Amino acid sequence: MTEVRLKKELTEVLKELSPQIEEALKYGVPHVVGEIRNNSGQLEVNATVSIFESSHHFLRLTSNGELLFIYPAEDSHPYRLFLDIWRFLEGKKSGSAVLGPGSMIKGNLRENLRRHGYEILWMNVQPTSEGEMIGVWARKGEVRYNFTFKKAGKDKFLLVEFSRV
């Protein structure tokens, strides 16, 4: 199967999962749990939706011709979700849902979050004994999030906590 055919099949699977993801967004953080398997030269794509209460999990494993992955589906739109998952599977750190604890953001924090697809609702800077901490309330679609960043230098911010509200 060529890469084009693999992309098309993954997109079709995500289209089929879209209603389940939309429903799961009401109860927690839906994750696409999938596998891409090489079965005698033919690649097979299988996926399902699993829900975590408020956490985001990213996992990509390869073993014996299989690629297994878990990816948080913050958007039920199948094409946007496909692009995020494909970037993740390629090992690229772009895509809206790849932002997680330990991520370093350089530059304007508000603008970077906007580029990740978040609408900023509120930001607050609090000085602490460890430096400045920045609390951010944001939303992506209908889902709201709470971020806590630690200022790590001039125009550098380390994401310490990330939770769905």
Image (cartoon, grey):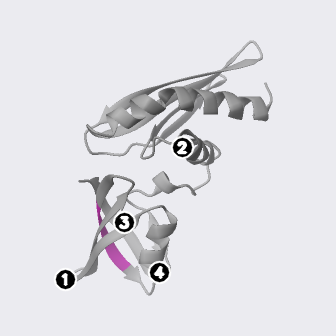
Q: Earlier in the sequence, mark 1 or mark 2?
A: 2
Residue under label 3: 159
- The residue that appears at 34% across and 60% down in the rendered structure is 139
Q: For the residue labelled by badge 4, is the local secondary structure a helix, a strand or a loop?
A: loop
Total marks in image: 4
Kindly identify the residue that appears in the image at 40 percent across and 29 percent down.
20
Distance from label 1 to label 2 (Cα)? 40 Å
Residue at image point 48% right, 76% down: 111
Q: Amino acid at mark 2?
A: Leu
* Front of the two marks 4 and 3: 4
Of helix, strand and loop, which mostly describes the magenta segment? strand
In this view, 122 is above or below 60: below
Query: Residue 24's spot in the image, x, y percent?
Result: 33, 34
Residue 16 point in image, percent of width and height: 52, 26
Q: Amino acid at mark 3?
A: Leu
Residue at which label 1 appears: 129
Which residue corresponds to mark 4? 108
Mark 4 or mark 3: whose residue is earlier in sequence: 4
Foreground mark, 1 or 2? 2
Q: CA distance from mark 4 to mark 2?
A: 25 Å
**Magenta part of the protein: which range?**
146-151
**Image-based side of 37 in relation to 15, left or right:** right
- State the image coordinates of residue 6 (x, y, percent, origin top left): 71, 30
Sequence-earlier tag: 1 or 3: 1
